[in-house]
Image: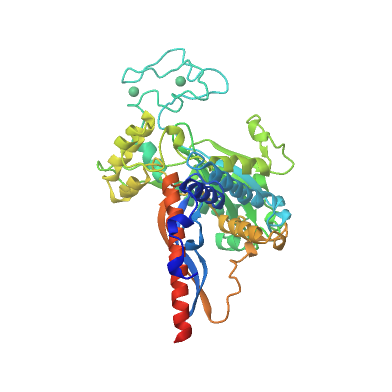
Amino acid sequence: MDASTEPPVDQALPSRELLGLAGIGSAQQRTHDCARPVRLHGSTTLVNRATGETRTVYSSAQELDGSTWVPCGNRRASACEPCSTRYKGDAWQLINTGLAGGKGIPASVAAHPCTFVTLTAPSFGPVHGVRQKGPCRGRRDHPVCRHGRPLWCSRRHHDDDPRLGEPLCVDCYDYTAHLVWQWYVPELWRRFMINLQRELAHRCALPTAVFRERCKISYSKVVEFQVRAAVHVHAPIRLDGPDGPDGASPALALGLSSEDLEDAIRVSAARVDVLSAPLADGRSYRLRWGSQVDCRTITDTAERDSLCGTRRELLVHPEQVASYLSKYLTKATEDFGVPAQVRSAAHAVAVGASAHAVRLIATAEDLAGQHPDYALLLTHLATLGYRGHPITKSRAYSVTFGQLRRARRRARANPAGLPPDADVRQILDDDRDLPDGFELVSSWVFAGQGYIELDQAAAAVQSATRARIRHHRLDRLISPLREES
Ligand SMILES: [Zn+2]
Ligand SMILES: [Zn+2]
Ligand SMILES: [Zn+2]
């Protein structure tokens, strides 16, 4: 049958409905049920630069609907539950392997001095809160502020009370100090780590440069938004010898214990400060951590539920730390009704953000114009002025998200090829044993995000099928010519 006697394309295709379902179903399967997958068009090709020969390894044109679908990878559970769950699992591995070993990190890492620290924000004014005992803010004398508003609250708020975290008086609450402090948290953390190293060196009676050679400080740090929308920094901090997590603990060589580490943390947290850039009126803030610094020794002899216990319980199990932190990572500021992108305070009002969050965003907009150091606040409105990453770690802490994803790809491609105790830090990207003289060239363009409607999906499948048939016919028309020439 030659090309001219083939039935018309439309008759050769199954119904639109069937195609649409096939398109959506397979896209869902390919993105592991991602809620808003990304659609890409393009290909990966082997190219021989010397001869110009190309061989297509993979092309989105091969897919039924002509698109390559990839998961959105969003860590926020409110944006995409399946991607968030996968992210949370990876975060758990990343944190836990640094405390208990695994994925190639030796189990001996668990014996290194290690503590779980929480650095808090200072007070910017009284807010409604849940107290362990008694009412929100019980005051027998019922004082009022200079705006005539009560500085007391006799309620016992429920966990879901929308007033939680809202100031008792919005005019007394120092929104500017809150925003400026939040803006400088990454710098405050940087200075804290430098100071911690100095403080530990001092305790070992060593110059800092010598101490640095013998002891490395490893950490992973996660921020959590409190109900008053100020961040707290939670970080497992671990002391390593010169070889990081793979080498011996510095406990013996330097005589450092977890208690020494905790003492040094308290001293450094109380000592460091940052002077903010001046506001329009010339005022600057001297910024510090809040006075509440919480340290809990991480040990596998701790009860697994110790974090939920009394505040006097100062031991915590590695898996508890990993669960606690990976849970925070699936959230950002959505509890305040703030979406992932915010253009202005007016936008925040329109999408139903809390009054407290809207005031913080308005303050950020105001600050942005007061000094060049604050200009970028406008790009951090959705995180209420926090400009750091939700999770950061020192290089040697444990494995990375990239290494975990690479290991997962490898395990999917060849489950038998990855032993359970493999060091995921050693897995390199699979280069498919490229033939001599060839290199891999990838070219992708963004085609859209989110599943497409049934009709659109059906149309996409049809047009991709037509393109394939045209391509096939063209191929058959061209090949006899090639043979003749
Ligand atoms: Zn997703
Ligand atoms: Zn209250
Ligand atoms: Zn007031």
Tell me: residue 50, above or below residue 79. Answer: below
Question: What is the residue that sits farthest to the right in this orientation?
Answer: 301
For the residue pair 466 and 308, the one nearer the viewer reads as 466
Q: Residue at x 46, y 73 (%)?
A: 475
Residue 296 placed where, x, y %? 63, 40
The reply to whether residue 51 is visible in this rendering is no
Q: Quadrant of the C terminus?
A: bottom left
**175 left or right, relative to 289:** left
Residue 87 placed where, x, y %? 56, 48
Q: Residue at x 49, y 54 (%)?
A: 69
Residue 188 placed where, x, y %? 45, 47
For the residue pair 154 and 329, the one nearer the viewer reads as 329
Tell me: residue 54, above or below residue 401. Answer: below
Tell me: residue 136, above or below residue 37. Answer: above
Q: Quadrant of residue 82?
A: top right
Q: Residue at x 30, y 49 (%)?
A: 375
Residue 448 placed where, x, y %? 41, 52
